[in-house]
Image: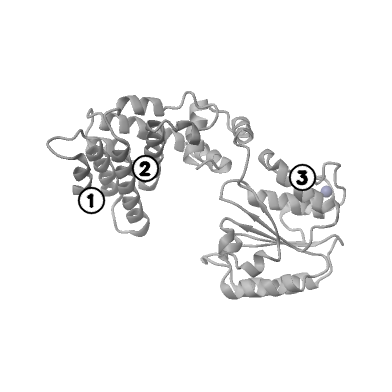
Amino acid sequence: MNRAFPWHAAQWDQWCRAFRRARLGHGWIFSGRAGFGKFEFARACAETVLCESIKADALACGQCRSCQLLRAGNHPDLRLVVPLEDAISIGIDQIRELGEFFSLTAHYGRAKIVIIRPAELMQHAAANALLKILEEPPALGLLILVADAIDRLPPTIRSRCQRLRLDAIDTSLAREWLAREVPSEPAQLDAAFALGNRAPLAAQAAIDADITQSASRIEQLMITVGSGRKHAVQAAQAVHDVAPTLLADCMLNQAHRFALAQLGLAGLSEPQSSQSAPVESLISALNHLHSWQVLAFAARVLEVKTLIVSSANTRDADLLDQLWRTWMLATRPAAGGHPRSQVQENS
Ligand SMILES: [Zn+2]
């Protein structure tokens, strides 16, 4: 890849202005939620800086020696720092090695670039070591920190870097891109975007993994269970092949959309072309529900999801069963008592 994603046009322009004016400085933080292409953006920046025959639009040529080495993943002037295998953080030794990397002359004389990802996983000592590099930056050194959670980086590091936020995007551009990349029905694109929490690359992954098909099955089952035409046990059996975390996410997503739609706020979280959004069928099938019932259900699903994530000993079948029973109790019309108590009784 030698270009930024279309939804990053404004950020790309901003970065290129700094590049053309030789004002890149030595440190950048590219931040924002996962699934928006921060790392790809960082790579495109590195390609531009290192390319020996840059194009008029500031994109790398893709042909020169530098571009070919980058494509092959072994450009001597680019270093990628990620958590080592079996590690959940970036250690001090990995950052100390950068001192040696920066001390060597740039092979192609343009820059020495380091991309750290996810930068917020640096251990305290590693962050301190990085701070020393930022305080006395090497002449041709450029550090790019890619971070999902910028607020977990020390303020001393944040203050020494220029910043770009890459998850504030034009959703319509992202949808056009997704429709080109993975041609799909509008309803499937809507479902993928919703499942991916509006992040285009996460939506693409959802379609690639055929997660949207599972989501559609789950939605239909929520309708049939919610309207009393199927029992929770039957529903759990019908989607026994779905991971409990995916089921919980789909249920939460539907509950969220349903509650918003009931409040007349559906458009706030829906993509622009979602007139065909299947939430309509969910609403008409479950119009006996109150918003609070759906929200109480969502709270319970969150509890079960926490259990799923934290416990390796619970059987998937039990968790699936539990989630469907929660939905069945939440949607059962109140009989002789307040339905809120039914949700709690099951917890
Ligand atoms: Zn090139």
Is the CB of mark 1 within 8 Å of ligand 1?
Answer: no
The residue that mark 1 highlights is 347
Q: Residue at x 68, y 43 (%)?
A: 8
Q: In the visual, does 111 lie left or right of 176?
A: right
Query: Disc 3 designates what residue?
Result: 13
Task: Please tell me which of labels 1 and 2 falls first in the chain.
Answer: 2
Does residue 320 appear to the left or right of 126 in the view shown?
A: left
How far from the left and from the top, in percent, is residue 54?
85, 47
**Secondary element at tag 3:** helix
Label 2 crowd (10 A; few <14 / some 14-19 / many >=20):
many
Earlier along the polypeptide chain: callout 1 or callout 3?
3
Q: Is mark 2 within 8 Å of ligand 1?
A: no
Residue tagged by mark 2? Answer: 247
Picture coordinates of residue 163, whole percent (x, y): 69, 56
> How much space separates mark 2 and mark 3, taking CA atoms?
40 Å
Q: Position of residue 276 (x, y in %)?
A: 47, 23
Secondary element under disc 1, as helix, strand or loop, is: loop
Dot in front, 1 or 2? 1
Q: Amino acid at mark 3?
A: Asp
